[in-house]
Amino acid sequence: MKKNTKKLSKREATFIIVVLVIIGASGLYALRLQARSIEKLKAIDTFEECAAAGNPIMESYPEQCAANGRSFSNPNQKVEPSTN
C-alpha cells in the first residue's frame, strides 16, 4: 500500500507563509483600530471632546452632542431665564 504524500514546492510553501503573515498582520491591525476607538469613546467627557470626535450635534439650544450613550451640552450657549 502506497501513501499518497505530496511535498510542497518552495514556491507553494512561500506563498502559504506570505498569506498567513498577511492574515496575521491584518488581524493585529484590526485589533489596534478597535482598541483605539474604544479608548476614544471612554475619553469623551465634555461637549468639545464629543464634537471633536465627530459625533452628531443636535440642533437644540443649547447644542447637545451624543456619544456612547451620554449627551453633553455646549457650555458656551446658556439659556437665559425669561423676564416676562
Image: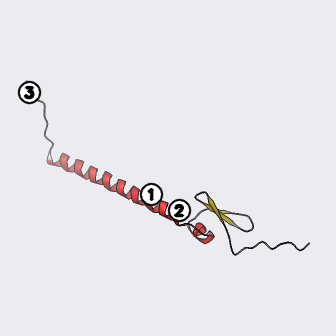
Disc 2, SS: helix
User: What's the residue at 13%, 34% (across, down)?
Assistant: 5
Q: Is residue 21 left or right of residue 4?
A: right
Instruction: Using the image, tell me which numbered label, if any, was put on residue 2.
Output: 3
User: Residue flagged by tag 2: what amino acid is it?
Assistant: Leu
Quadrant where the N terminus lies?
Answer: top left
Q: Residue at x 20, y 50 (%)?
A: 14
Question: Could you tell me residue 74's position as x and y percent?
Answer: 68, 70
Discs 3, 2 touching: Cβ within 8 Å: no
Looking at this view, name the residue that lies furthest to the top: 1
Is 51 placed left or right of 6 in the picture?
right
**The C terminus lies in quadrant:** bottom right
| Disc 1 versus disc 2: nearer the observer | 2
Which residue occupies 31% across, 53% down? 24
Q: Amino acid at mark 3?
A: Lys
Tell me the distance, in whole angstroms, between the alpha carbons under discs 1 and 2: 11 Å
Q: Amino acid at mark 1?
A: Gln
Tell me which numbered mark, 1 or 3, is placed earlier along the sequence: 3
Q: Which mark is residue 34?
A: 1
Where does the image place residue 36, in percent across and percent down from the top left? Answer: 45, 62
Mark-to-mark CA distance, 3 and 2: 61 Å
Is 17 situated above or below 82? above
Residue drawn at x 27%, y 53% is 21
Indicate which disc, 3 or 2, sits on the residue closer to the N terminus: 3
Q: Which residue is mark 2?
A: 41
- Between the residue at mark 1 and the residue at mark 3, the CA separation in whole angstroms equals 51 Å
Above or below: residue 37 compared with residue 80: above
